[in-house]
Image (cartoon, rainbow, N blue to C red):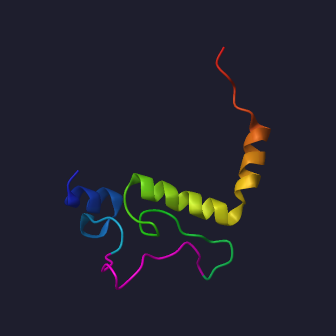
């Protein structure tokens, strides 16, 4: 869609994605907030815009909550069905 479409339907200021940051002068916001248990994730936080960066943002936040080892333990418990 167009920036106007993104502004209208996705509530993006001027249809833009991510914050305006000047390279070398500012950094993207992190994932922690002053509120205990509330974390931020998405294209507005580090590492930035785009599908891979947004996915990485979610992984960073998830790893803040639970260690990678614990993630593997949880995945082992749910055992996804296999193809026959």
Quadrant where the C terminus lies?
top right
Dividing the picture into quadrants, the one containing residue 47 is: bottom left
Q: Is residue 45 part of the magenta span, yes or no?
A: no
Image spot of residue 61 (x, y percent) = 60, 64
The number of discs equals 0
Residue 40 in percent (x, y) is at: 54, 69
Please tell me which residue lies in front, 84 or 40: 84
Residue range in magenta is 20-33
Is 57 left or right of 13, judged from the image as shown?
right
Residue 65 placement: quadrant = bottom right
Does the segment drawn in magenta span residue 30? Answer: yes
Q: Return the residue found at the far front.
A: 24
Left or right of residue 48: residue 58: right
Farthest residue to the bottom: give it: 25
Q: Which of 46 and 9 is in front in this view?
A: 46
Percent x, y for residue 23?
31, 78
Q: Residue at x 64, y 79 (%)?
A: 35
Q: Is 22 situated above or below 47? A: below
Question: Of all residues shown, which one is farthest toward the top?
Answer: 84
At 72% across and 60% down in the image, what residue appears?
A: 66
| Location of residue 80 with respect to 30 vertically, above or below | above
| Predominant SS along the magenta part | loop
Q: Which of 25 and 50 is in front in this view?
A: 25
Picture quadrant where residue 60 is located: bottom right
> Which residue is pictured at 31% across the width and 76% down the height?
20
Q: What residue is drawn where x is 42% and y is 69%? A: 44
Q: Where is residue 67 in the image (x, y as percent from the top left)?
A: 72, 60
């Amino acid at each position: 869609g167009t920036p106007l479409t993104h502004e209208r339907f996705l509530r993006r200021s001027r249809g833009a994605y991510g914050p305006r940051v000047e390279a070398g002068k500012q950094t993207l916001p992190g994932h922690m907030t002053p509120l205990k248990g509330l974390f931020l994730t998405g294209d507005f936080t580090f590492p930035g815009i785009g599908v891979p960066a947004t996915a990485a943002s979610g992984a960073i936040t998830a790893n803040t909550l639970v260690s990678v080892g614990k993630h593997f333990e949880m995945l082992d418990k749910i055992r996804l069905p296999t193809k026959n």
